[in-house]
């Protein structure tokens, strides 16, 4: 059975992530900032809500940044929302803030996108939007999309979007004024901009796949 | 490939039971909130809103426990409102499993509270709830003001300016209820919805007055709402969520199905 550590650094709603993981069969879900428990867990979930500045500050205060750097590539890790953004190098939020820098790339503001302004699109990008699954290096969709229709809708709520620089890192794409990467994957890391724990059946399916994923 | 409009069933909860008032007064029992919420989740509701109308402290604890139970069974976004006065209230509800909180009277008393909440928890989880009542005479251009305490207290605050102010303070969404329309089943106050939608750059949820599916379509197509909220048409089995989605999709509105 699978134990999952949901990294708790004081930001956002961890309850729903934990409940959703339990729903799809995680045997032990621990919401924790204890490095020992994090290292002992089979799988790691890095959630995140709110401002990136606060997320990064709290991550550092709790030593979560060190734990993630240490464990990424080592055991399956799922980043969610700001948890995805934090994996990149830099965000424009709060006047500019450095992320964990695990992957090169930037996090940008929707309101600065010309088409968002011209089409009077609301910011935050909030609600259910289609996700196009991108083929991986082997030409197939990522295993975490298994059983989920290409183009299925997931629940988003964010004002900033990820622009990964690494070719092939993106595993899913969404569109809001412009096409943007809403999922990235490399090795045992998978991260999504949307909230699988709030995306009904398809979201639960993605979490189910994560628990059974053998990267 | 496009963002879908949302259908949000709303549960007004008093002492742990779903109720539905007409013009905030007459009450009718509609069941256990967790059961009701689970039914909507299964039917494909895009979000669920839970407004606690209980005034007592004991009632507040009941609410937190209800949110906890609901969050274990509902896997779409859950917004909780009612009686939120300070940052600690928000923290407690988010910890219980709410995804967003809706702030109403506390913002009227002290608008900076919205800014503090958005700064602490992020705009994505702060919904500004606005209860507006038409104050313009028939035939005049529409003008609405903010009312509190279930519509009893007039504040003199212009609703359109108020919505813009709270969005500027970092509210991530506006939950807009017409006090005139609420419970009438005569449809949203579309001029109000349109005025607020045009005035703010954050999503607007239209609320108050839905009596049939065409009213939902009107809220989106004429009012410009990003989401439509309704209570009694769903609670009492007049329509299911899939029926509502089919109806709106036939009118060219993008839906998650």
Image (tube, rainbow, N blue to C red):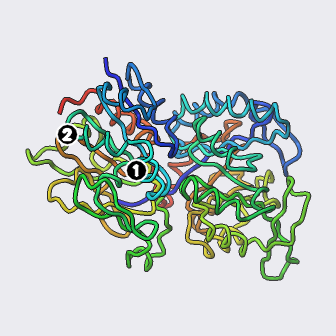
* Tag of residue A81: 1
Residue A121 image point, x, y percent: 47, 70
Q: Chain of mark 1?
A: A
Closest to the observer, B92 or A113? B92
Q: Quadrant of the N terminus of chain A?
A: top left
- Identified at 30% across, 50% down, the residue is A151
User: Is residue B4 shown left or right of residue A40?
Assistant: right
- Identified at 9% across, 48% down, the residue is A137
Q: Chain of mark 2?
A: A
Q: Are marks 2 and 1 on the same chain?
A: yes
Number of residues whose C-alpha sits closer than 10 Å to that of mark 1, classed few (under 14), some (14–19) or many (20 or more): many
- According to the picture, the residue beneath numbered tag 2 turns out to be A73
Residue B246 image point, x, y percent: 50, 49
Distance from label 2 to label 1 (Cα)? 19 Å
The answer to which image quadrant residue B197 occupies is: bottom right
The answer to which image quadrant residue B223 occupies is: bottom right
User: Is residue A62 shown left or right of residue A136?
Assistant: right
């Amino acid at each position: 059975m699978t134990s999952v550590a949901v990294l708790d650094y004081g930001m956002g709603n961890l309850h729903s992530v934990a409940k959703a993981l339990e729903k799809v069969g995680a045997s032990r879900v621990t919401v924790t900032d204890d490095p020992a428990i994090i290292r002992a867990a089979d799988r790691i979930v890095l959630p995140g809500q709110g401002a990136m500045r606060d997320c990064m500050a709290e991550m550092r205060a709790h030593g979560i940044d060190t734990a993630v750097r240490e464990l990424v590539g080592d055991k399956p890790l799922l980043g969610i929302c700001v948890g995805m953004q934090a994996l990149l190098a830099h965000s424009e939020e709060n006047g500019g803030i450095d992320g964990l820098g695990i992957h090169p790339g930037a996090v940008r503001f929707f309101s600065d996108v010309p088409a968002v302004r011209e089409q009077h699109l609301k910011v935050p990008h909030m609600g259910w939007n289609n996700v196009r699954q991108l083929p991986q290096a082997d030409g197939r969709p990522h295993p975490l999309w298994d059983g989920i229709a290409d183009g299925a809708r997931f629940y988003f709520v964010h004002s900033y979007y990820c622009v990964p620089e690494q070719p092939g890192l993106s595993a899913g794409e969404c569109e809001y004024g412009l096409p943007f990467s809403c999922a990235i994957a490399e090795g045992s890391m998978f991260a999504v901009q949307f909230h699988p724990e709030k995306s009904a059946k398809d979201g639960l399916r993605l979490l189910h796949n994560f628990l059974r994923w053998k990267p | 490939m496009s963002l879908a409009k949302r259908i949000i069933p709303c549960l007004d909860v008093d002492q742990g039971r779903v109720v539905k008032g007409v013009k905030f007064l007459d009450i009718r029992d509609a069941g256990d909130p967790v059961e009701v919420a689970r039914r909507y989740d299964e039917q494909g509701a895009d979000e669920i809103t839970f407004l606690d109308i209980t005034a007592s402290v004991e009632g507040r604890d009941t609410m937190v426990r209800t949110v906890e139970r609901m969050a274990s069974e509902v896997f779409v976004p859950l917004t909780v409102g009612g009686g939120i006065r300070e940052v600690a209230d928000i923290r407690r509800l988010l910890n219980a499993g709410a995804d967003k909180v809706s702030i109403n009277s506390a913002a009227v008393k002290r608008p900076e509270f919205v800014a503090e909440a958005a700064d602490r928890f992020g705009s994505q989880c702060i919904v500004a709830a606005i209860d507006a009542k038409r104050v313009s005479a028939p035939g005049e251009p529409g003008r609405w003001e903010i009312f509190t305490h279930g519509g009893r207290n007039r504040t003199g605050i212009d609703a359109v300016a108020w919505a813009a102010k709270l969005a500027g303070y970092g509210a991530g969404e506006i939950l807009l209820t017409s006090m005139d329309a609420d419970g009438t089943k005569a449809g949203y106050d579309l001029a109000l919805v349109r005025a607020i939608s045009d005035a703010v750059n954050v999503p607007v949820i239209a609320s108050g007055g839905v009596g049939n599916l065409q009213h939902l379509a009107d809220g989106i197509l004429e009012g410009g709402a990003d989401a439509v909220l309704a209570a009694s048409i769903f609670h009492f089995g007049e329509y299911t969520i899939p029926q509502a989605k089919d109806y709106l999709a036939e009118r060219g509105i993008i839906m998650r199905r």
